Amino acid sequence: MSAAVQETKAEAGAPLLQADGVSIQFGGLKALTDFNLSVRQGDLQGLIGPNGAGKSTAFNVLTGVYQPTQGEVRVGGQRVNGWLPHQINHLGLARTFQNIRLFRALTALDNVKVACRAQGALHPEGVGLGAKMKGAFINYRDWWRALLLTPRFQQEERELTQQAEHLLEVMGLSHRRDEEARNLPYGEQRRLEIARALGTQPKVLLLDEPAAGMNTREKADLMVLIRKLRDDFKLGVLVIEHDMKLVMGICECITVLDHGETIARGAPAQVRSDRKVIEAYLGDSYLESQGGAA
Ligand SMILES: Nc1ncnc2c1ncn2[C@@H]1O[C@H](COP(=O)(O)OP(=O)(O)OP(=O)(O)O)[C@@H](O)[C@H]1O
């Protein structure tokens, strides 16, 4: 870790994202049990575990897609249980999905612009009728502005385009600016998803299997890129990833889930030699491939 990042971490203070004793149950299935997590600025953490361990469920609970059966989620110190995903996003939490969810028929630029616009818009925070009515009023006002092409709307459009172009450049996608998302190669679609998440100006970025489907070269580039995003955008990053080389290579702290329970947490070296982790996930073949035993 660079001295600059260590310094940033020391200043980081309070967690940007926190889960305290979070559990969620689907019928009789305990998908996540007593899950605790803390992400601060400058963190690059991993979340791993076998298929069905509860990793995506954890992301869904943290981002408001699912409501926890028990426990508390805080974003920027604010309790967000019961909040909608876009409201939580507005507090500074953005994510990508395991199955890419781009606007397939929109250009790369427009995919990112949509996210930049969402952040620029005022989203009333909280739950309840007051927030809903305020939201409806804002939507109505913005609709008229767009319809009448007011000078302010046009100025905002220019600024959004510049922001989106910058993010495409950061993600190495400038050459795809005007191509429809569905026509991009798979690896580039994954990077476009990250550009779109960055468009909402997050403080914490959750990446769900960002390297899935990428070739070795693309994965290596992605590792460098994720670190750079963490540093340049002053983010806290949490990554779900099955590629152990990538997770062990970039994450400073790794949480391991199995059947919804946290079975280990620590630095890569500590986690990969943990007997429970080897038994549940890595397997002895992984150890052998690394040339050692626990
Ligand atoms: N909406 C839902 N309704 C019912 N069960 C669910 C729901 N979402 C997840 N589950 C179950 O919760 C468990 C955890 O699933 P989850 O998708 O979080 O695992 P995962 O660790 O992300 O797995 P993978 O690595 O395969 O993506 C699984 O048994 C899954 O079938």
Image (cartoon, helix red, strand yellow):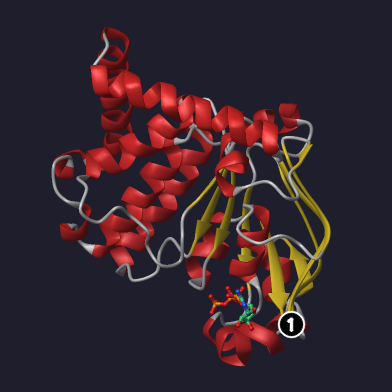
Residues 257 and 98: in front is 98
Tell me the quadrant of the picture where the N terminus can be found: top right
Q: Residue furthest top?
A: 151
Residue 68 seen anywhere in this rendered image of the structure: yes
Q: Quadrant for ligand 1?
A: bottom right
Element type where label 1 sits in the image: loop
Instruction: Identify the residue shown where x is 56% and y is 58%.
Output: 239
Q: In which quarter of the image is residue 177?
A: top left
Determine whether the beta carbon of the residue marked 1 sits less than 8 angstroms from the nearest atom of ligand 1: yes
Residues 113 and 219: in front is 113
Residue underneath mark 1: 27
Q: In this view, does 165 lie above or below 195?
A: above
Residue 5 seen anywhere in this rendered image of the structure: no
Q: In which quarter of the image is residue 5?
A: top right
> Whole-percent x and y of residue 49?
63, 76
Q: In this rendering, would 177 be left or right of 130?
A: left
Instruction: Identify the residue shown where x is 65% and y is 78%.
Output: 53
Instruction: Identify the residue shown where x is 39% and y is 69%.
Output: 212
> Whole-percent x and y of residue 237?
58, 47
Q: In this rendering, would 184 be left or right of 253?
A: left
> Whole-percent x and y of residue 183?
15, 59
Within 10 Å of the Cα at label 1, are there few (<14), some (14-19), or many (20+) other Cα atoms?
Answer: few
Q: Is residue 8 above or below residue 42?
A: above
> Whole-percent x and y of residue 74?
76, 44
Tell me the quadrant of the picture where the C terminus can be found: bottom right
Three-letter code, disc 1: Gly
Q: In this rendering, would 218 be left or right of 62?
A: left
